[in-house]
Image: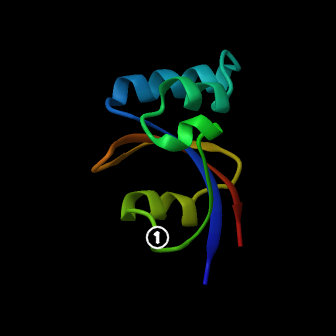
Amino acid sequence: MKTASARHILVKDEVLCNELKKKISTGEITFEQAAREYSLCPSGARGGALGSFSQGQMVPEFDKVVFSDEVGVVHGPVKTQFGYHLIEITNRS
């Protein structure tokens, strides 16, 4: 079974999600800082870290990115029923 670890930032709107992605890519803010300041998920307190999880544990839209896209890159906005995510896959096996 595939497993991965990732961190994410969850916000309510796509505009903010895109703004944060831009700020992270230019180095204006780190992923961890953005997660602590803006994420609506409790994982924000841990810099967005979700720890390790198996394929199928997350909602399908999230799962698809984590188990198929490039590791170590900030992906998103990814829309789910919870809002818009920026996702960084930190490990996958």
Q: In this view of the protein, can residue 76 be seen by the observer?
A: no
Q: Position of residue 59 (x, y in %)?
A: 38, 62
- Image quarter where the N terminus lies is bottom right
Q: Residue furthest top?
A: 28
* Tag 1 residue: 57
Q: Where is residue 81? Give x, y as percent.
A: 27, 50
Q: Nearer the viewer, residue 42 or 86?
A: 42
In x, y percent, where is residue 46? 64, 40
The single residue placed furthest to the left in the displayed view is 81
Residue 15, percent from left and from top: 36, 23
Q: Give the residue type at disc 1.
A: Gln
Q: Nearer the viewer, residue 73 or 30?
A: 30
Q: Quadrant of the C terminus?
A: bottom right
Residue at (62% x, 78% y) in the render: 2
Q: Residue at x 66, y 19 (%)?
A: 29
Q: Residue at x 46, y 63 (%)?
A: 64
Answer with left or right where residue 18 lies relative to residue 83.
Answer: right
Q: Give residue 84's quadrant in the image.
A: top left
Q: Is residue 36 above or below residue 58?
A: above
Residue drawn at the location 32% of the way across and 32% of the way down: 12
- 28 sits left or right of 44 in the view: right
Outermost residue to the bottom: 1
